[in-house]
Amino acid sequence: MIIVKTREEIELMRESALIVSKTLGMLAKEVKPGVTTLQLDKLAEDFIREQGAIPGFLGLYDFPNTLCMSPNDQVVHGFPTKEPLKEGDIISIDCGAIKNDYYGDHAYTFAVGEIAPETQTLLDVTKESLYVGIREFKIGNRVGDVGYAIQKHCEDRGYGVVRELVGHGIGKKMHEDPEMPNYGKRGRGKKFLEGQVVAIEPMINLGTHRIEQHRDGWTITTLDNKPSAHFEHDVAIVDGKPELLSTFAYIYEALGIVSNEEDEFRQKPIVL
């Protein structure tokens, strides 16, 4: 069952989402060669608690950390480790926070120093596909419209779209209805509703779409060991249109990136 939110609840969810956005913005300055993902995990936990929130992943389904840290060929759900990041790596950081009983859930794939051009293009296309999908999250459309748009954008460029892992509704639970696949057919699936909030999160591979789950029950890698990228936003339907609750603006401020990619999905500008 889809749980729609009131305008007041959506604003509470925006607060949770922005705490996660600020956390990723803080981490953006720290992602560099020589840093371990366990160090980043500790920074994130401390920062989230300083904001008056609770880490959303810590203990969820018995996950032992604040961040899912997935380097290179890891798709999602990787554990933070003592292994230092290296020049040329990529690292997908997925983060959650709870405030006012509502979850925020947000992900970004960072380059560690200079990365291979083909890997950079994978990151660019995956992030593009996120907004292509968000554009279809509106009244009059269905779940399949979002999935179709993401799938076509990525597969037309030769990338593999992961099938087994999907986006989701979000609210007082991290995972609510509906599931939001990154593939699908137009006009199929549940209708979108005013006040609905979802996490849209393309997980796109440089090679095959096929994946492998490791014996730890969490870590997932690409079957061909080629890189994978992951970007995620929390989005509400407000006045029939998609409204971003999360933002990459804090990341971009930290990295010196100028972008207007979010403008069409935001009624009010983000004040940094």
Image (cartoon, rainbow, N blue to C red):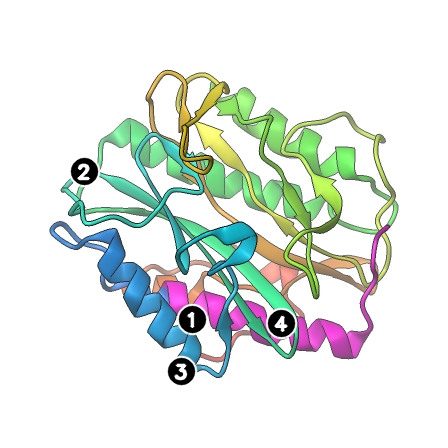
In the image, what residue type sits under mark 2? Answer: Gly
* In-front residue for pair 225/202: 225
Residue at the spot x=72%, y=61% of the render? 236
Label ID, residue 50 = 3
- SS of the residue at dot 2? loop
Upstream in sequence: badge 3 or badge 4 = 4
Residue 217 placement (x, y as % from top left)? 46, 35
Question: Disc 2 marks which residue?
Answer: 88
> Which image quadrant: the C terminus?
bottom left
- SS of the residue at dot 4? helix
- SS of the residue at dot 1? helix
Q: Main secondary structure of the magenta part?
A: helix
Question: Disc 1 marks which residue?
Answer: 22
In the orientation shown, which residue stands out farthest toward the left?
34
Provide the residue span drawn in magenta: 1-24
Seen in the picture, residue 166 relative to 99 is either above or below; the reply is above
Q: Residues within 10 Å of mark 2 (few under 14, many from 20)?
A: some
Label ID, residue 14 = 4
Residue depth check, mark 3 versus mark 1: number of the one nearer the observer: 3
Upstream in sequence: badge 3 or badge 1 = 1
Using the rendered image of the protein, determine whether residue 256 is visible from the camera's viewpoint: no
Upstream in sequence: badge 1 or badge 2 = 1
CB atoms at circles 3 and 1 under 8 Å apart? no
Tell me how far mark 2 sits from mark 3, CA to CA: 32 Å
